Amino acid sequence: MRITSILFFVLLFLLSSFVGSKKKPDTGNNQNWFIGKWEGMGDQVDGSKWKVKLNVRSKKKITIEYPDLFCSGKWKVVKNSGDVINLKENIIKGTDKCDQGCEMTVQRISDSEINVSYSLKGYSGAYAKAVLHKM
């Protein structure tokens, strides 16, 4: 009888440990999926295409490069809604070659693919889009 009681308490302890170790639910503000290096092609409404290199080191360290346009800069997170992130662009190098003040909406398609929509004040809707793949 004593061994049965001990086994019962051991099993109860193991079961409670398993139940207590459940993964916490995603609050919708997790940006870990966004961290990494991304590359792809941008496609503007006028038909021009350009290479995009995005490097997301953290929520506050996001750099962007457009090698075909000879410009680069930084992105700043404005709003995060889980699988959709809104950002603002600041071109630092090649300011005469790229539009300044673009706003981007990044939407997660999968762990290895995102869609980026570019909008600019004074232009209705997205004036450019890009599909980027995680490197």
Image: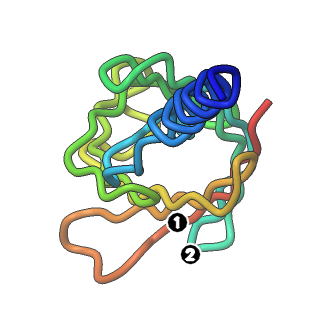
In the rendered image, the quadrant that contains the N terminus is top right
Q: Nearer the viewer, residue 101 or 96?
A: 101
Q: Is residue 48 above or below residue 26?
A: below
In the rendered image, the quadrant that contains the C terminus is top right
Image quarter for residue 134?
Answer: top right
Mark 2 neighbour class, 10 Å CA radius: few under 14, some 14 to 19, many 20 or more: few
Q: Percent position (x, y) of residue 118?
A: 43, 60
Report if residue 28 is visible in the image: yes
Amino acid beneath label 2: Val
Farthest-out residue, front: 1
User: Do labels 1 and 2 touch, CB within 8 Å?
Assistant: yes
Which residue: 40% across, 24% down?
73
Helix, strand, or loop for circle 1? strand
Which residue: 51% across, 61% down?
107
Q: Nearer the viewer, residue 97 or 27?
A: 27
Helix, strand, or loop for circle 2? loop
Can you identify the residue that label 1 sits on?
128
Q: Earlier in the sequence, mark 1 or mark 2?
A: 2
Which residue: 54% across, 28% down?
9
**For the residues carrying marks 1 and 2, which lies nearer the camera in this image?**
1
Can you identify the residue that label 2 sits on?
45
- Mark 1–mark 2 distance (CA, rounded to whole Å): 6 Å
Image quarter for residue 53?
Answer: top right
Q: Percent position (x, y) of residue 8?
A: 61, 34
